[in-house]
Amino acid sequence: MRRMGIGLQMYTLREETAQDFRGTLRKVAELGYEGVEFAGYGDIPADEMKTILQELGLQAIGSHVGLHLLREDLQKEIDYLKTIGAKYMMCPYVALEDRSSAEDWRKLFVFLEEVGTEVRKQGLVFGYHNHAFEFEDQVGNAFAYDALYEATSPEAVQVEMDVCWIQYAGQDPLVYIPKYAGRLPLLHLKDFSVDDQGEMKTLELSQGNVNLPAVIKAASDAGTQWLIVEQDVCQNPPFESISNSLNWVKNHYLNQF
């Protein structure tokens, strides 16, 4: 199996970064994470963020950049990522008002292709991060998820697959990972269970229903570069949760190398 980087999606620590962004990054580095994927920068200027990450030995993987930011000032987002040495820009979500019909989705596909083309022209990689609604909405005869990647080029729009949401949507991550092999540089490594109301509860790795060892093997075979740990809501204090998840990754994946 090929060695992939292990990162953290900083959204997991959003309450901590709101209090002390710099100190939170330091703790992430001390735990042993190799990289971070941002979801906002806490108003830290790019040059300062670059210095912080270099001092901590953390790789800037990339960032989740909302549709409104892509529309308002794409160049600003590109410049920030380039300054901090990150490679990936991911669209993380589509609000309901932007996907109320198949036609809305088709317009979005065109926009994402345009964004991805410009991002690639400037040396970065653009992609899309899924939830479950992409498997509830249909575009033609396909799920919106598959229609998106059929309508866009791999050069412009890559895949950031959230296996937790795919499984929650009733699909099999072990089918979808190889389906997008070669187009899947980032994978969100998450675990979950479903409560009595049918709601998803994100859990520390190995505490839920996702076949994580098989997911990791499939991601390696598919050419994934980074496994990114994320927990939408932590059942323990967040630093404890991300530490427990990283320890599982170390024991069941990293100790093979």
Image: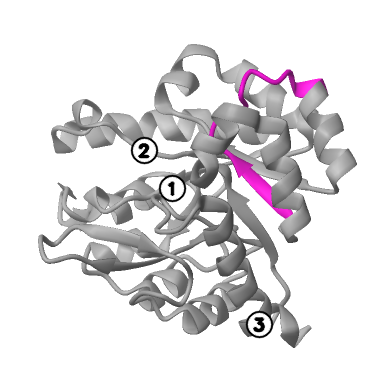
Q: Is 42 inside the magenta-drawn segment?
A: yes
Q: Is residue 117 magenta?
A: no
Magenta span: 34-47
Residue placed furthest toward the right:
55
Indicate the quadrant containing the C terminus: top left, top right, bottom left or bottom right.
bottom right
Marks 1/2 in contact by CB < 8 Å: the verdict is yes
Determine if residue 216 is in view.
Answer: yes
- Tell me the SS state at disc 3: helix
Q: Which mark is residue 251?
A: 3
Residue 225 image position (x, y, % from top left):
66, 62
Residue where numbered disc 2 is placed: 93
Contact, CB < 8 Å: mark 3 with mark 1?
A: no
Task: For mark 1, give the secondary structure.
Answer: strand
| Residues packed near mark 1 inside 10 Å, few (<14), some (14 to 19) or many (20 plus) | some
Q: Mark 1: which amino acid?
A: His
First along the sequence among labels 3 and 1: 1
Q: Residue furthest front?
A: 237
Q: Return the residue nearer the eye: 175 or 64.
A: 64
